[in-house]
Image (cartoon, helix red, strand yellow):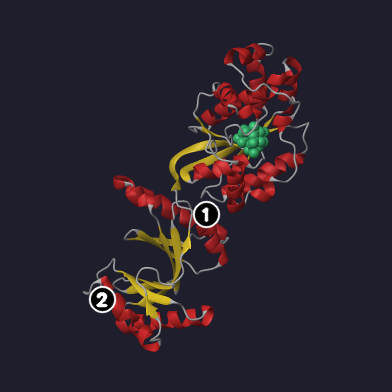
């Protein structure tokens, strides 16, 4: 069944990928299908056709579709379109109707132009000739309306095809990036703070899907801490076509045992090293290729260069820190844009602050840290925490 309406999807970066281009386009199209169908609450997948470096989504324009498309990484922009039979008079009339509509809604524009993209050579004339011809009736009806080819206030776009063509006037920008699934999957360490969900979405935007792990301070923190992480995961999962599970490691007792044995100044670093060891295990089990954290250089005591180095050194897998060079206000701006802010600022205790010291060491060394770790059985605690893992299926 053909809809009257359709949506034009544009993409940039993946168009540059040479021989892999078709593969990237298939990923992008499949992500659009899944994310839009999910947003519309429909089991049946929406149709997406690939055409000449653009895609056409067979769907009506509404708020849900618009929101879903704004979350598909790899798209650069999109436009709701009307279908017209490829007939000179029909297209002229449709373009005139668009102009009249625009004037009714927004008042008389400064300037206008028609812009034809002739990816199928339905007509022999050049695109500029076609533009002038199709804009004719608009010019006749509104002689004072100036044509501006460079920067028109009203741009009427035409995608010219053999049988049916498409007209659009509105263009919404999307996030760009690469389609999720075009790069290897990762494991994101989710704390419940502002930074980690933004970090996870940053790597989704570069094409890696994310599974999630949370170290839960139970029994010393309440269920609100876990609920907050679940809510954040739900938001991050909106950006991937296949939502991923949350792995929860009970961690409060582990921290208590560490805290009782070591010098207080080292507690936080030792917790973080333990988290990375366990995250490595989980990632290897799930065949994930790297970890992602929300660390940013110098933001807190555990994020000095020296402390990041001693934390990092226990990880066999690469640890990606997409926020390393971000200021807090830049992170907050992204949290607002991506919808994680309101949840992230809900009050809840993160386990990292459990039994933590007011004056943590700022310049740890491997030797100092290993000396502290020799005071308890690292392996035993690691095994114990890992054994308590619970998996919350994708939601
Ligand atoms: P966030 O805003 O993400 O909580 P933060 O600025 O509070 O980060 P830290 O608490 O030092 O900084 O945590 C740094 C990173 O370590 C987090 O972004 C997250 O990736 C990881 N992390 C910290 N605590 C946990 C936890 N309880 N479970 C999983 N990952 C965690
Ligand atoms: Mg935190």
Q: Disc 2 marks which residue?
A: 129
Label 1 vs 2, first from the N-terminus? 1
Q: Disc 1 marks which residue?
A: 71
In this view, the residue in front, 245 or 147, is 147
On screen, residue 14 versus residue 66, left or right, reads: left
Callout 1: 10 Å neighbours few (<14), some, many (20+)? many
Q: In this view, does 209 lie above or below 151?
A: above
Q: Is residue 216 above or below residue 372?
A: below
Secondary structure beneath label 2: helix
Q: Which residue is drawn at 44% across and 55% down?
A: 75
The spot of residue 327 in percent (x, y) is 58, 41
The spot of residue 348 in percent (x, y) is 75, 40
> Mark 1 near ligand 1 (CB under 8 Å)?
no
Q: Do the residues labelled 1 and 2 touch (CB within 8 Å)?
A: no
Real-space Cα distance between discs 1 and 2? 37 Å
Q: Can residue 255 be seen in this view?
A: yes
In this view, the residue in front, 49 or 45, is 49
Q: Residue at x 68, y 28 (%)?
A: 388
In this view, the residue in front, 354 or 208, is 354
């Amino acid at each position: 069944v053909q809809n009257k309406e359709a949506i034009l999807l544009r993409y940039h970066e993946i168009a540059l990928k040479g021989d892999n281009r078709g593969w990237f386009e298939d990923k992008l199209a499949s992500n659009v299908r899944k994310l839009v169908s999910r947003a519309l609450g429909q089991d049946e997948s929406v149709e997406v056709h690939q055409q000449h470096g653009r895609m056409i989504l067979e769907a009506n324009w509404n708020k849900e579709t618009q929101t879903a498309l704004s979350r598909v990484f790899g798209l650069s922009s999109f436009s709701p379109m009307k279908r017209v039979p490829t007939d000179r008079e029909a297209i002229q009339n449709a373009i005139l109707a668009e102009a009249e509509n625009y004037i009714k809604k927004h008042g008389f524009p400064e300037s206008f132009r028609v812009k034809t993209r002739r990816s199928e050579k339905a007509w022999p004339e050049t695109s500029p000739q076609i533009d002038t011809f199709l804009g004719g009736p608009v010019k006749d009806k509104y002689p004072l309306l100036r044509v501006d080819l460079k920067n028109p206030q009203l741009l009427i776009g035409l995608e010219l095809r053999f049988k049916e063509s498409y007209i659009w006037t509105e263009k919404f920008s999307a996030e760009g990036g690469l389609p999720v699934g075009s790069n290897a999957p990762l494991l994101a360490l989710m704390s419940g703070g502002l930074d980690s969900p933004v970090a996870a979405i940053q790597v989704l935007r570069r094409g890696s899907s994310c599974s999630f792990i949370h170290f839960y301070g139970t029994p010393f923190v309440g269920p609100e801490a876990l609920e907050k992480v679940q809510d954040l995961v739900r938001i991050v999962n909106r950006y991937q076509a296949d939502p991923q599970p949350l792995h929860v490691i009970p961690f409060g007792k582990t921290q208590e045992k560490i805290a009782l044995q070591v010098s207080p100044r080292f507690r936080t670093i030792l917790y973080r090293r333990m988290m990375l060891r366990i995250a490595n295990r989980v990632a290897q089990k799930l065949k994930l290729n790297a970890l992602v954290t929300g660390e940013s250089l110098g933001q807190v005591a555990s994020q000095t260069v020296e402390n990041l180095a001693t934390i990092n050194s226990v990880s066999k897998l690469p640890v990606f820190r997409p926020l390393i060079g971000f200021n807090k206000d830049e992170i907050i701006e992204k949290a607002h844009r991506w919808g994680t802010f309101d949840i992230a600022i809900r009050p809840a205790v993160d386990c990292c602050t459990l039994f933590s010291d007011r004056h943590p060491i700022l310049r740890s060394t491997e030797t100092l840290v290993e000396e502290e770790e020799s005071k308890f059985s690292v392996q035993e605690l690691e095994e114990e925490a890992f054994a308590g893992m619970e998996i919350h299926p994708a939601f």
